[in-house]
Image (cartoon, grey):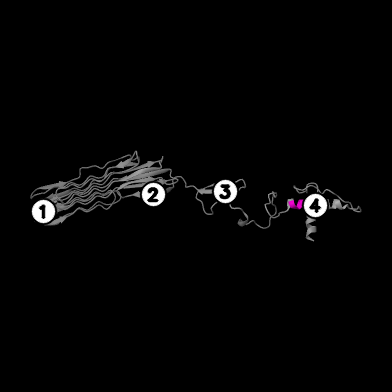
């Protein structure tokens, strides 16, 4: 019977010497063949076996008294283990905590130093706040000033011409910051407006762009000029004398590229100046003219920090003035690294 087999097993566990179970004492009473057994002693031996079984054999409830498991034939499943609170899944460069029982009790991913975490692009004119992304230890910032507007071309009398010059590109600079504050102020300079079609009007300068304080900053490009009315036999050009420098860039500081001048000759030539291209797009195309009675407004810039184009009027009779093209707003890009 099974109870007899269990008793036999426990008798072996409770035998004295090296084979005794660590939590059981030897059987209190020993009997010899041929001698009568006292009932009290027999009952004491059985009680000893019961106590030893309760100590050494698994039972329902918390088995805190079991200190070692050997020879298991059935693997322990995950359902039999208590939860650790660690979220299942893959971890990148994991940082783990191991508890006293040897199991992982906490795990988080930690980006490798120098990993690009986020890129923030600001291309709309105005002022905003940049907030440091979690885990950021260094940033690289690119700043571009707004592009200048192109010059207008006034209305002219018969046989006369007028031309406007293109707007200059905004300056560009780049810096690296390794001690990163929680937030910085970002300013994106607006594009300069083209000269109005009301007379001899130069284009407006582009606005300056900046990041932080002390800031990395770049000036906007200068606006294009205009020639005025050019009569027969005379010539003139409308240039762009400004310079859009930068400061604070630890990696580089660069002035904006120059624009094209507008050229006019009273004998019948009018070539408006193209706007300067920026680092991320082209400038406006000049409003050139091809024959008597031709007009052309300046084209708008199509890339951050680029300049607008100048306008042109080549009159065979009285013609209306033409506006210069608008410059593009500047740009700020922030690269965040772990």
Answer whether residue 53 is magenta in the image. yes
Rate crowding at label 2 as few (under 14), some (14 to 19) or many (20 or more) other CA atoms within 10 Å.
few
Q: Which residue is mark 1?
A: 268
Task: Say whether marks 4 and 3 touch (CB < 8 Å).
Answer: no
* Labels 4, 3: front one: 4
Of mark 2 and mark 4, the one earlier in the sequence is 4
Of mark 3 and mark 1, the one earlier in the sequence is 3
Q: Name the side, left or right, on which 46 lies relative to 236.
A: right
* Labels 2, 4: front one: 4
Q: Which residue is mark 3?
A: 105
Residue 119 has which mark? 2
* Residue 252 % position (x, y): 33, 41
Q: Find the residue positioned furthest to the right.
A: 34
Q: Which residues are magenta?
A: 48-54
Give how far apart the Cα atoms at labels 4 and 3 are.
43 Å
Answer whether residue 18 is magenta in the image. no
Residue 323 has which mark? none
Instruction: Judge by depth and name the residue closer to the eye, 47 or 268.
Output: 47
Of mark 4 and mark 3, the one earlier in the sequence is 4
Rate crowding at label 1 as few (under 14), some (14 to 19) or many (20 or more) other CA atoms within 10 Å.
many
Give how far apart the Cα atoms at labels 3 and 1 are.
85 Å
Task: Say whether marks 2 and 4 touch (CB < 8 Å).
Answer: no
Of mark 1 and mark 4, the one earlier in the sequence is 4
């Amino acid at each position: 019977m099974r109870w007899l087999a269990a008793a036999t097993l426990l008798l072996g566990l409770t035998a004295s010497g090296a084979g005794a179970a660590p939590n059981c004492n030897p059987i209190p009473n020993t009997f010899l063949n041929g001698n009568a057994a006292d009932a009290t002693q027999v009952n004491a031996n059985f009680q000893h076996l019961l106590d030893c079984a309760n100590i050494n054999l698994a039972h329902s409830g918390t088995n805190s008294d079991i200190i070692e498991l050997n020879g298991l034939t059935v693997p322990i499943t995950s359902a039999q283990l208590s939860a650790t609170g660690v979220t299942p899944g893959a971890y990148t460069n994991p940082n783990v905590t191991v508890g006293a029982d040897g199991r992982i009790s906490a795990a988080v991913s930690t980006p490798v130093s120098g990993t690009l975490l986020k890129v923030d692009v600001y291309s709309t004119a105005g002022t905003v706040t940049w907030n440091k992304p979690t885990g950021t230890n260094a940033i690289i910032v690119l700043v571009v000033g707004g592009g200048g507007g192109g010059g207008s071309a006034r209305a002219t009398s018969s046989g006369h011409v007028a031309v406007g010059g293109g707007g200059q590109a905004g300056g560009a600079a780049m810096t690296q910051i390794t001690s990163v504050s929680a937030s910085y102020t970002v300013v994106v300079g607006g594009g300069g407006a083209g000269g109005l079609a009301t007379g001899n009007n130069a284009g407006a300068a582009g606005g300056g762009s900046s990041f932080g304080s002390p800031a990395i900053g770049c000036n906007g490009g200068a606006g294009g000029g205009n020639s005025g009315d050019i009569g027969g036999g005379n010539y003139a050009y409308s240039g762009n004398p400004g310079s859009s420098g930068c400061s604070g860039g630890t990696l580089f500081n660069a002035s904006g590229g120059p624009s094209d001048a507008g050229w006019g000759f009273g004998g019948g030539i009018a070539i408006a100046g193209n706007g300067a291209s920026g680092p991320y797009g082209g400038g406006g195309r000049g409003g050139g003219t091809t024959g008597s009675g031709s007009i052309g407004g300046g084209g708008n810039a199509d890339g951050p920090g680029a300049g607008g184009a100048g306008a042109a009027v080549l009159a065979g009779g009285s013609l209306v003035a033409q506006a210069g093209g608008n410059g593009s707003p500047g740009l700020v890009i922030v690269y965040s690294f772990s």
